Image (cartoon, rainbow, N blue to C red):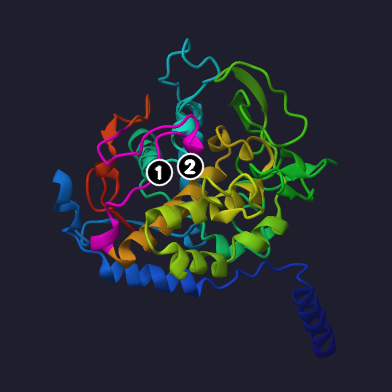
């Protein structure tokens, strides 16, 4: 029996060494330390500027936590709340968005409708902060969710996303890879130079809590092959959610080292423009030749597929929320490294890649979330301690 136990142990060790049976998260000490530093530097009074209301303190602030640190019951509660929104009736009038079939779809339609004025714009970060907060509020207020929106620290799964607790297909994940379906590479960047090699997926997601989930709204800018286009925007185009999880993407652009570089490299610390351009993959002048994904595009194309690889329709895949919570955390870390200087910084025009040409965005501009939240000025969404907010990241 003793020899058999030794033999089994040796086999287990070999399997672990070969990476056959065990997912091992990568350390994220770099960004975690920066987050701790940011929390210690956060000035509760900073949001009092520009007539932004603040009743939040560090003592009463909600805490957003990393998804893999949640208990199984906490993960199941989060997923149940999302599925609750998917089962509730929509509020968007059908004549405005015929493809909307649920309360969840209200949020998808909002993102699609606003796409050309919320990406590569001065309000990219603030709009999405408000957007994911409104989603969090809906989970809590409309579906009884008792916690707060978790985030996906990309670096933890960068080497092995397909077997990570975020996308391993277990009941406590946010869904698994798509079933294998042969396909070509996926064009991912505006430049056309970032074609993601085909992975192990490509077909419908058949594992995890969203197995069989249907994406209702019509594709607007699909990058994945075989997706029908040409339907009216916000139309009804029911189809399965497809994924092709890509370690090729995450190992290059989603590592902790990439995030640390974004948050500490002097080239991206001069102002918010330099930081957010790098986060999104490049500025207006070089984005059409860039081969660099940036953490934003890299996150989306780590799971990819359809609708994940469709810029406008990407919230139809529930991984969107964990990803953009981490985008918000990354901005939160950057802001609170120098809170008195950075909280109220914005930069960029009011249109995507300044096309058509538009004026610079202002903190007085309104963020319009249509049927998901009231319109509100940008200035109210620049501090996680001011305006409607009262949260920190752990």
Tell me which residue sits at (51%, 28%) in the image: 112
Q: Report x, y in % for residue 39.
A: 30, 67
Q: With 202 as the anchor, is 166 left or right in this view? A: left
Q: Report x, y in % for residue 131.
A: 39, 38
Q: With 323 as the anchor, is 190 left or right in this view? A: right
Q: Report x, y in % for residue 111.
A: 47, 32
The extreme top residue here reads 95
Q: Which mark is residue 231?
A: none
CA distance separating discs 1 and 2: 7 Å
Is 89 above or below relative to 369? above
Q: With 7 as the anchor, is 140 left or right in this view? A: left
Label 2 belongs to which residue?
Answer: 120
Tell me which residue sits at (63%, 41%) in the image: 190
**Residue 124 in sight from this viewpoint:** yes
Dot 2: within a 10 Å radius of its alpha carbon, few (fewer than 14), some, or many (20 or more) residues? many
Contact between marks 1 and 2 (CB within 8 A): the answer is: yes
Q: Report x, y in % for residue 146.
A: 35, 47
The extreme bottom residue here reads 2
Question: Which quadrant is the C terminus positioned in?
Answer: bottom left
Tell me which residue sits at (68%, 56%) in the image: 249
Label 1 belongs to which residue?
Answer: 348
Range of residues picked out in magenta: 339-366
Question: Which quadrant is the N terminus positioned in?
Answer: bottom right
- Quadrant of the rendered image containing residue 247: bottom right
The overriding secondary structure of the stretch rendered in magenta is loop
- Is residue 364 one of those drawn in magenta? yes
Q: With 207 as the anchor, is 267 left or right in this view? A: left
In what element is the residue under mark 1? loop
Of badges 1 and 2, nearer the viewer stands 1
């Amino acid at each position: 029996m003793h020899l058999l136990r030794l033999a089994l142990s040796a086999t287990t060790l070999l399997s672990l060494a070969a990476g056959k049976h065990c997912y091992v998260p990568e350390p994220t000490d770099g960004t975690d330390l920066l987050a701790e530093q940011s929390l210690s530097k956060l000035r509760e009074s900073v949001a009092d500027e520009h007539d932004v209301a603040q009743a939040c303190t560090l003592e009463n602030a909600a805490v957003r936590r990393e998804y893999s640190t949640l208990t199984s019951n906490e993960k199941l509660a989060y997923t149940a709340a999302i599925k609750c929104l998917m089962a509730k009736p929509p509020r968007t009038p059908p004549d405005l968005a015929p493809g909307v079939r649920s309360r969840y779809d209200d949020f998808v339609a909002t993102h699609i409708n606003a796409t050309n004025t919320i990406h590569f714009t001065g309000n990219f970060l603030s709009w999405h902060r408000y957007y994911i907060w409104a989603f969090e509020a809906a989970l809590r207020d409309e579906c009884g969710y008792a916690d707060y929106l978790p985030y996906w620290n990309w670096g933890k799964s960068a080497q092995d996303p397909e077997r990570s607790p975020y996308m391993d297909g277990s009941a406590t994940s946010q869904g698994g890879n798509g079933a294998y379906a042969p396909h070509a590479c996926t064009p991912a960047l505006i430049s056309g130079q970032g074609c993601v090699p085909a992975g192990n997926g490509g077909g419908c997601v058949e594992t995890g809590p969203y197995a069989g989930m249907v994406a209702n709204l019509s594709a607007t800018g699909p990058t994945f092959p075989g997706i029908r286009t040409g339907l009216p925007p916000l139309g009804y185009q029911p189809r399965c959610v497809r994924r092709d999880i890509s370690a090729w993407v995450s190992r290059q652009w989603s590592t902790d080292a990439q995030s640390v570089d974004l948050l500490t490299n002097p080239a991206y610390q001069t102002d918010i423009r330099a930081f957010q351009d790098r986060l999104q993959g490049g500025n207006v002048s070089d984005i059409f030749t860039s081969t660099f994904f940036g953490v934003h595009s890299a996150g989306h194309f780590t799971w990819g597929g359809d609708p994940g690889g469709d810029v406008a329709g990407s919230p139809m895949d529930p991984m969107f929320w964990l990803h953009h919570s981490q985008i918000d955390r990354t901005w939160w870390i950057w802001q609170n490294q120098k809170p008195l200087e950075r909280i109220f910084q914005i930069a960029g025009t009011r249109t995507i890649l300044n096309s058509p040409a538009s004026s610079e965005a202002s903190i007085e501009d309104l963020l319009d979330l249509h049927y998901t939240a009231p319109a509100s000025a940008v200035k109210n969404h620049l501090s996680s301690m001011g305006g409607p907010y009262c949260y920190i990241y752990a």
